[in-house]
Each structure stands twice: as structure tokens, then as C-alpha cells.
Amino acid sequence: MESHMQLRSAKFPSMISSLLHSNQFLKMFSFYSLSLALITLVGLILSINKGPEVITLTTSGGIISEGKPNLDAFVQQALRKYLEKRYKWNPDDVVQKLRESESFILPNTQKAFEEAVSKVARFSKEKLASQKIFIDEIQIDLKLKTALITGTRITSIQNLPAAGDMKLELSFESGPHTQENPWGIYVTKEKED
């Protein structure tokens, strides 16, 4: 009689093998997790002990790289914006541009400014006049609070352009910072040669 015998492997050694393998995996995972936690802790301690870095930003959001902010450049930037609104217009947008330039005028001089620009707006509408300026140089005197602007002005009346030199002296002072005038530079007097 032939008998067949089947050999069975014991379950205990395979269970021990699988347990050792999973323990090895858990040991490696624990070691890597602990290493990552220690590296994070060291980085956190270093960043907490480091003081804050203070940066100075321009009104347009750029970083000022110099140690001290350049006041001349700051005032020039404000005056360029004022000149863009006050002296660059055409018959279609003259009223809007001149109204926007009022944000650079202090309230106590607002009435005189409105009278002066109303004549300009009326003339532009009646004669179809437009004006553009190209600034060559702005010289700032912070002690006297004046700016001398030189450049070229192109005036067009009924589509007939005429170019000429522009020499403008502006007196300014500082005031409150607003959304329309974040520089806080206000024009108090204009003198044109």
C-alpha cells in the first residue's frame, strides 16, 4: 500500500519571521521619524533665536537696498506722479487727470488750485488742446523744500503740435499719507518760467 505523506511547514517559524520583518520596518520608520523630528526641532530653535529682518519698502513695494532711504528719490517719485497727473492730459481726460492731481494739494490751497485748473480744463475742452511733458531733470532742495524741474513740453491745439522747453519750480511740504498720495508730499506753489 502506498501512502502519501504530506509535509507541512510549521507555522511558528514563519510567524516569527514575519514579526521580525515588521519589527525591523517599524524600527527603521521610528529612527527616520526621530531624525526628522530632531532636524525640525534644531531648525525651529535656530529660527526662533534669530532676530527679525527689517526691510524698507518703496511705495510701489520694491525693496530699498541702501542703509538709509534716499529722500531725494522719494520726493522725486512723488513729484513725478504729480506732474504726470497735472501736466499730461488730452481733452477727453483733462478733468479726470486734474481732479486726480488734487490729491497732491493741501486743503488750505485747494480753492486756488481748483480755480487755476478749471481755466486749463475749459481751454482744453474748447480748443481741443492736449499736453505732454518729458522730464529731463528734477533737482530737489530739501532745505528750501523746492524742486526745479526741466524738460520738454509738447502742446497740441486742434491737432497742431508745438514743442518748447519747460522750466518749473515747485514748492512742497510733507503732510498726511493717503491712499491717493502715499508719499505725503504736497505741492504748495508752482512757478513756471
Image: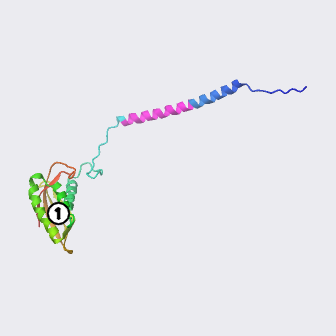
Residue reaching furthest bottom? 160
**Magenta: predominant secondary structure element?**
helix
Residue reaching furthest right? 1
Secondary structure beneath disc 1? strand
Q: Residues within 10 Å of mark 1 (few under 14, many from 20)?
A: many
Left or right side of 1 for 81: left
Asked if one can make out residue 31 in the rendered structure from this viewpoint, the answer is: yes
Q: Position of residue 47 (x, y in %)?
A: 37, 37
Magenta residues span: 27-47
Residue sitting nearer the eye, 93 or 192: 93
Q: Which residue is mark 1?
A: 149
- Tell me which colouring the rendered structure shows: rainbow
Going by the numbered disc 1, the residue's amino acid type is: Ile
> At 74% from the left edge and 27% from the top edge, which residue is drawn?
9
Residue sitting nearer the eye, 191 or 12: 12
Relative to 112, does residue 3 appear above or below in the rendering? Answer: above
> At 23% from the left edge and 50% from the top edge, which residue is drawn?
69
Q: Position of residue 32 (x, y in %)?
A: 52, 33
Q: Quadrant of residue 140?
A: bottom left
Left or right side of 148 for 28: right
Residue sitting nearer the eye, 66 or 96: 96
Residue sitting nearer the eye, 143 or 136: 136
Q: Confirm whether the magenta stretch covers residue 37.
A: yes
Left or right side of 103 for 6: right
Q: Position of residue 56 (x, y in %)?
A: 27, 47
Left or right side of 2 for 85: left
Q: Position of residue 158 (x, y in %)?
A: 19, 74
Asked if one can make out residue 189 in the rendered structure from this viewpoint, the answer is: no
> At 9% from the left edge and 52% from the top edge, which residue is drawn?
108
